[in-house]
Amino acid sequence: DAKTTQPNSMESNEEEPVHLPCNHSTISGTDYIHWYRQLPSQGPEYVIHGLTSNVNNRMASLAIAEDRKSSTLILHRATLRDAAVYYCILRRGDTDKLIFGTGTRLQVFP
Amino acid sequence: DAGVIQSPRHEVTEMGQEVTLRCKPISGHDYLFWYRQTMMRGLELLIYFNNNVPIDDSGMPEDRFSAKMPNASFSTLKIQPSEPRDSAVYFCASSLGGVNTEAFFGQGTRLTVV
């Protein structure tokens, strides 16, 4: 399964933008880039996904590199409630599998 | 819709006993996933179904684990016999379609085998 690489942890101050990077150099043409987050003691929660173009929704923005080998999840103004583990996932086009990696633990300070 | 519903939320059982975890996916969703989460191994995909048919069970750790989806609104994950190393949080998720859709997760079942 295609692998993603993320930093283990990142820190941010409240109300500042946060850029969470992800490398996926083995991505294939039909793989979608998905981001999920997991708050403490909860199940994973969908954040955003995309194929080639940048995407925006009410939670975040997803910036995808032109070669698709990396992407960045952007939280425009971090809040304390955004403290979670963020997972970058390649959902394979041929199998539809959703395989989680180790994720980035985001800490947000007041 | 109430979302993905898992039961029980917590289960404590003795080693050797049979354990059955239950999942009700969101109505109309045709994909269902079972995951296991531990501190050591993170979130592992155990098995997933498409239209009630098991597609890939390569993540099921041993023959002690089995999963069924008898209809579109219900799935079970059974462990028999259970062992202490099976202690984990088990999540069920469903999605409306495949690669271009989001998955919705349940709150999980925390299993403790003593």
Image (spheres, coloured by chain):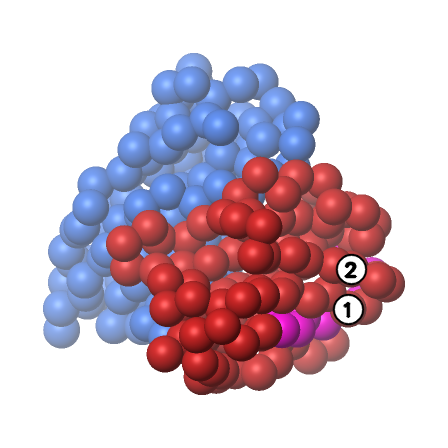
Q: Position of residue B62 (x, y in %)?
A: 53, 49
CB under 8 Å between discs 2 and 1:
yes
> Mark 1: few, some, or many residues within 10 Å (few <14, many ≥20)?
some
Residue B80 position by quadrant = bottom right
Vertical arrangement, residue A40 with respect to residue B69, above or below: below
Q: Amino acid at mark 2?
A: Met
Q: Which residue is more in the foreground, B95 or A62? A: B95
Where does the image place residue A35, in percent across and percent down from the top left? 45, 47
Please give the residue where the numbered disc 2 appears in the rendered image: B69
Where residue A38 appears, as percent x and y from the top left, is: 39, 62
Question: Drawn colour of chain A?
Answer: blue
Q: Earlier in the sequence, mark 2 or mark 1?
A: 2
Q: Which residues are magenta?
A: B20-29
Nearest to the observer: residue B50 or residue B22: B22
Q: Nearer the viewer, residue A4 or B111?
A: B111
Q: Residue beneath label 1, please?
A: B74
Which subunit holds the residue at mark 2? B
Colour chain B appears in: red
| Mark 2: secondary structure | strand
The local crowd at label 2, few if under 14, some if 14 to 19, many if 20 or more residues have their Cα within 10 Å, is many
Q: Write down the quadrant of residue B95 in the picture.
A: bottom right
Q: Which label is found at residue B27? A: none
Q: Residue at x 27, y 54 (%)?
A: B40
Inspect the magenta stretch and tell me whether residue B81 lies in it.
Answer: no
Could you tell me the amino acid type at mark 1? Answer: Phe
Name, please, the residue furthest toward the right.
B71
| Image quarter (top left, top right, bottom left or bottom right) of the C terminus of chain A | bottom left
Q: Is residue B72 left or right of residue B103?
A: right
